[in-house]
Each structure stands twice: as structure tokens, then as C-alpha cells.
Amino acid sequence: MSGAERLTASEAARRLEAGSLTAETLIRDCLDRIEARAEVKAWCWLDRELAVAQARAVDRDGRPGLLKGVPVGVKDVIDTYDMPTQHGSPIYAGSRPFADAACVALTRLAGGIILGKTVTTEFANRHPRETVHPVNPAHTPGGSSSGSAAAVADFQVPVGFGTQTGGSTIRPAAFCGVVGYKPSFGEFSRVGIKMQCHNLDTLGILCRSLDDLSLMRAALLVQPRRPIDRSASTPRIGFCRTPAWDHADADTQALLERVVSRLSAVGATLEDVAPAPADILDQHRRIFEFEAARNYAYEYEMHADKLSPALRDGLLKPGRELPLSAYIEAIECAEMFRAGLDDVFDEFDVLLAPSAVGEAPEGLGSTGDARFNALWTLAWTPCVNLPAGTGRRGLPLGVQLVGARFRDEALLDAAAWIEARLGS
């Protein structure tokens, strides 16, 4: 390996454009890293010859497009015409879609290379699969975007696609110590992504720098790249402990308090804010159960014996039993919550909140607690996880930054301002 596997997507794109790096070299370095670190088990489908052939084609064409040959890992609930999409389930073992998902097609259009498919929990839900934490294999990498988070953290690929219905992008990003991004709801196309909850599902990005987010946003939105503005003015920050604060462990609470103190010391205006009603997680859960139970009707009716008990009995069965009136009430409460947040963002540019309960928990039977993410998924707000140190077990901790709906670029600017002050 030449070391190219450790480049961020933005660094790789610059070197590819300058001609000091070839796509084939980058792809081979990533593949060699994957082979050397096979114990992480981040990939469920990988074809070395196909990956190298894609890279050679990009090099022959002069590395055109915004991504210039940057490799991307694709969560295995996202369709790829030339690779299986199996949803982490025996129901779809070996299944090949007839077309790429929109995000995959747009990545290829921008000159990106689809390196392979990363492991997902069963149907991007709660039942974990084989991926382990890249720092300590006795711990979960989080989920449901387990493979993408672990692969990016372990320098196997610079960028991975995830999805988030509860906390499936931000939480594994925090656990694995990478940058995670859940955009405003509806900003990225979900065509070709296995639908779980039509009011919650969001395509996410896992990477190793904020600049990678601006690069991937431009590719996925087919817009000129807008660089992050690192000269933006000091953001107005609201410290939001959320109704779940008491569930955060001592390390996480101390981290957030230190961040607040640090940012206050360098001139930021910080105020406590509590925009979420106490029962907001109950409303998220109702919507999740009701919609998933209907979107997985085929799997439940035709292949119930191939579903995990956690999915079949823990989510789909309760969702079928939930009255329509309870679902409608939850939808109405969510709308009121979002309207209230819009007013909050008249006073604040960004909210600071926990990314997770704590470090990645020990054991592989669970992907961790999503309570610090679900309310923002319900809010339809953009969120970013910034790595921010380690806990007592030496595993990563993160902080979550939340922006106003459809003000994603302003959130990335504020995140860069905060990152610079925390790193100084």
C-alpha cells in the first residue's frame, strides 16, 4: 500500500485531479487495506476485479467529474445494478436489482467508483450482523450503517453511504470516530433505497472530514460544489440536553459540558434550550412502527420465518396493532415539534447535543441506543457528528450539531467553526 487509503475523499479528489495519484492506485490501496483488516467484516459484497476495472476506466477517461475516481462504499439496502442488494436478510440472498439507486447513479455520474456493498443490520433495523468495531472487536460499531461506519473509520474507503430512520448514521459515526451527516429530510433522493418509513428514512454520509460532505453534497444534488466557509461569523449555539439527558453516561455529559465551556471561552454565545417535548421519542416510535409494518408487508406475509424475532415481533407486529388514530396523532405532534423548532432557529444557528449515550457498548448483540438521534430524525433537521475525544475505555465519543431545516450549508459552516475551536 502506498498510503493513499488514508486520504480523505477531498484530498484524494485533489490528487486525482492533479495527476499525482491514479484511481487504480487508490482503489488497490483500499482493497489491500480491506484484505489486511478482514476481521472488521465491514463488507458483504466485494469484487476486486470489478473495482479495479472501474478505476482503470476512470483513469483512461482522464478522471472526469467532481469525484475524479474517489471510491464509495454503499450500504446494502441501496440498489446497485452490478452488485447484489441483499438488505442484510436471507430473503434477498443473491438478489440483483435492475437499476442503480439515484445516489449510486449520481455518484457514478460524478466520476465516483462504487467499491462494494457494506454490511447493514437486517433491513437497516435493530438486528445486528457480523461487523465489529475497528478499534475493539468486542464492541459494536453501531448500526444500522455498521459496515460503512467501520470501513470509513478503518481507512478501507474514504466515504460510505448510510441511512437513518432512528440513529443509523449519526450513532455509528460517533461510535467509530468519523464524521457523520444526516441531511434535511428529502434533500437527497431516496429512489432505489429500501423503504422502511416514508416519513423518516434519510440517506446519510460517513466520511473523515467536513470537506468531504460538501464534495458529496455537490455530487448528490448535481450542483456546483460550495466550499465550506471557514470565515463565517461566530454561530449562536443552543445547548440542548434533550429529554433523554439522564440516559447519557458520565463521560458523555462531561464531554458536552467541556465543549460548552471551551466554546464559551473562545467567544461563542451559548444558551440552554429545550425545544423537544418530553414524549417526543414516543411519537417517533409510533411513526416508525406503523409505517415499517406496512412497508414490510411482503416480507412479513411471505417470509415471516426468515425475519428475526426482533424485527418480526418487536417492530412489525406492534406496528400492525397500532391504531390509525395513534399514528395520526404522532404525525400531528411531529408537525408541531418541527414548527416549534423553526422558531428556535430564529434565535440560534446551531444546536449542540449528544450524538450517543456513550462509547460503543461492549458486545455484538445490539447496535446501541438511538434516543439521542431519533428526535432529530423526526424533526427533519440536518445533523452532523463531530468526533470529540474518547471515553474511559478508549473508544471514540462525538458531539452532535443540529441545524435548521434546509439550512444544511449553514450547519456545515458552523460545524467547521466549532471543529476549529475544539481542535485548537
Image (spheres, rainbow, N blue to C red):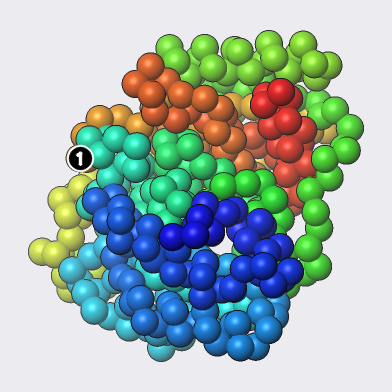
Q: Residues within 10 Å of mark 1 (few under 14, many from 20)?
A: few
Which is nearer the eye, 207 or 15?
A: 15
- Residue 62 is situated, as x and y percent measured from the top left of the image, at 68, 84
Q: How many marks?
A: 1
Residue 265: in sight, yes or no? yes
**Residue 423 vs residue 299: left or right?**
right
Q: Amino acid at mark 1?
A: Gly
What residue is shown at x 15% (from left), y 51% (from top)? Answer: 309
Establish if 335 lies above or below 419: below
Which is nearer the eye, 384 or 47?
A: 47
What residue is shown at x 80% (from left), y 54% (from top)? Answer: 227
What residue is shown at x 82% (from left), y 40% (from top)? Answer: 230
What residue is shown at x 33% (from left), y 72% (from top)? Answer: 46
Where does the N terminus fall, quadrant-wise? bottom left
**Residue 318 vs residue 167: left or right?**
left
- Residue 371 is situated, as x and y percent measured from the top left of the image, at 43, 32
Where does the C terminus fall, quadrant-wise? top right
The part of the image, by quadrant, that contains residue 29 is bottom left
Establish if 392 lies above or below 331: above
**Residue 367 vs residue 23: left or right?**
left
Which is nearer the eye, 84 or 276?
A: 84
Residue 80: in sight, yes or no? no
Residue matched to label 1: 365
- Residue 64 is situated, as x and y percent measured from the top left of the image, at 70, 80
- Residue 63 is situated, as x and y percent measured from the top left of the image, at 66, 79
- Element assignment for label 1: loop
Establish if 293 lies above or below 350: below
